[in-house]
Amino acid sequence: MKSESHSPKFKTQVVLQLLRDDTSLSSQALKYNLEEHELIKWKYEFLDLAENMIVKQQNQEIFMRVKKQKSITEIKMKNDFLKKMLK
């Protein structure tokens, strides 16, 4: 089996099939004419990227909640100030 350059789309499809199916690594390697170590590398790269995306998404959600809470706090402070000015 020779070393080839594969597209990210192809790698993703192969890894997803590997994760979904109940087939062995060696049978997947044979099916796609790949080396097992390639599949292992692709799988770990995929899982690492997926984990990073989840963490990034969680961080974005936390940031948005903090930003929203900050806005609410600022509005409350301005409201309190205006109430005092009207008294």
Image (spheres, helix red, strand yellow):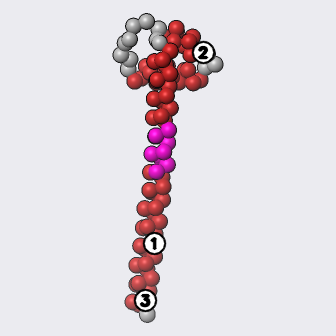
Determine which residue is flagged by label 2: 24
Q: Residue furthest top?
A: 1
Of the numbered discs 2 and 3, the one sitting upstream in the chain is 2
- If you read the primary sequence from the N terminus, does the residue marked by circle 1 or circle 2 appear first? 2
The residue wearing badge 3 is 84
The correct choice, above or below, for 56 with respect to 74 in the image is above
Rounded to the nearest angstrom, the CA distance separating label 2 from label 3 is: 72 Å
* Badge 1 element: helix
For the residues marked 1 and 3, what is the alpha-carbon distance in whole angstroms? 17 Å
Q: Secondary structure at mark 3?
A: helix
* Badge nearest the viewer, 1 or 3: 1
Q: Nearer the viewer, mark 1 or mark 2?
A: 2
Say which amino acid is labelled 3: Lys
Residue 42 is tagged as: none
The picture places residue 8, in percent across and down from the top left corner, at 40, 24
Please identify the dominant SS of the magenta region: helix
Membership of 79 in magenta stretch: no
Q: Read off the magenta span.
A: 51-59
Q: Which residue is mark 1?
A: 73
Figure disc tally? 3
The crowd level at tag 3 (other Cα within 10 Å; few <14, some 14-19, many 20+) is few
Q: Amino acid at mark 2?
A: Ser
**Secondary structure of residue under mark 2:** loop
Tell which residue pokes out farthest to the left in this image.
5
Q: Which residue lies at the image location 38% right of the left edge and 20% below the top edge?
A: 7
Name above or below for residue 37 compared with residue 56: above
